[in-house]
Image (cartoon, rainbow, N blue to C red):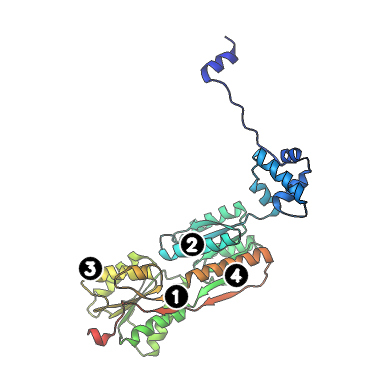
Amino acid sequence: MPIGKRFHKLFGEVKNVEKTVTIKDVARKANVSISTVSRVLNNSGYTSASVKEKVNKAVDELKFQKNMVATAMIKKQTSTFGLIIPDIKNIFYGELTRAIEDKAHQHGFNVILCNTDNNLEKEKEYLNFLLRKGIDGIIFSTPEINDRNIREVMKSRPDLPMVILGSKVQNVRLDEVLVDNVDGGYTATEHLIDLGHERIGYIGGQPDSYATVERLKGFKAAMEERALPLDKNHIKLDEFKIHSGYEKGKEILAENDRPTAIFAGNDAIAVGVYKAARELGIRIPEDLSVIGFDDSQFAEIVDPGLTTIRTPIAEMGEKTVELAVQIIKENKNFKESIMFPPTLVERASTASVKKVH
């Protein structure tokens, strides 16, 4: 039996491989030039309505798929941002990512999300990946104060649009969008002091985090202004996570002279403090007042509702995207530092000392 027949018997008829339709095929079908097809597909330059109709009809009949990679190479744009965040499990970053993605979509951009777990090596790997992809810009959300990766990218790609969200990086001049953390820390502490609390603890995130440092500044300023003692045993720094609030909360609340109030560096830490207090039989707010920071969804879910400092998460995310788009599309060449004011949101987790002691 001939080899061809034997092959068909064993494997059946060979189907024709579908041919990739090119822009040249579309031009031939529509009886126009390749440059005309390109103008229609990219919506650039003038083309008569009748010619557009012929080209679009040929595209539909041939089922032509526009090569986005090739287009990106020609335009030197991919309509894509890289968004680098430290922890997607943190509800704050979930809300922030959604706001950024929605706003980017309105401007015709896609977002590649990169979760670093606060690991600079992992962040570096993501940066290399994004640069290879040819992204149009990068948004760094709350990088470390001494983030060397940002400096390296600035040296190797000084033309790359970058915006920092929620933090400052030492010796780096980039567009940045911030909340006034010092004022927020001061306001949170002042609220507790006005309720009659004098022994107040602070549980913050990473020691090298801009938010931790600035919120602690505000805490200390309010305490010193009212001439209240700062007990170093009541100040704990770890991570902006629930387990940090739980572990550090247990340490502080187990002391004989425990605080009557705790300022948690973010709402996730506050949730951990709730858990520690419950296990130790300490009631909130009857025995302990707790205030958080961010006004994330945690604040309304927990019981009692969490008094907190509101960070305008959505507004900050939207503004960050607008800055990035201005740099890319309008060649904005000056740097801005935009500071959003925080606000106190009172709920049921804080109460007057006089009423409960």
Direction from residue 77 to residue 181 in the image, left or right? left
Direction from residue 273 to residue 32 in the image, left or right? right
Q: Earlier in the sequence, mark 4 or mark 3?
A: 4
Callouts 4 and 1 close, C-beta under 8 Å: no
Q: Secondary structure at mark 4?
A: loop
Q: CA distance from mark 4 to mark 1?
A: 20 Å
Task: Determine which residue is flagged by label 4.
Answer: 174
Q: Residue furthest left?
A: 281
Callouts 4 and 3 close, C-beta under 8 Å: no
Q: Secondary structure at mark 1?
A: helix
Callouts 2 and 3 close, C-beta under 8 Å: no
Task: Determine which residue is flagged by label 2.
Answer: 98
Question: Is residue 347 visible from the viewing direction of this image?
Answer: yes
- Please state which amino acid type lies under the numbered disc 4: Leu
Task: Determine which residue is flagged by label 1.
Answer: 213
Q: CA distance from mark 1 to mark 2?
A: 26 Å
- Please state which amino acid type lies under the numbered disc 1: Val
Q: Nearer the viewer, mark 4 or mark 3?
A: 3
Q: Earlier in the sequence, mark 4 or mark 1?
A: 4
Q: Residues within 10 Å of mark 1 (few under 14, many from 20)?
A: many
- Please state which amino acid type lies under the numbered disc 2: Arg
Callouts 1 and 2 close, C-beta under 8 Å: no
Q: Earlier in the sequence, mark 2 or mark 3?
A: 2
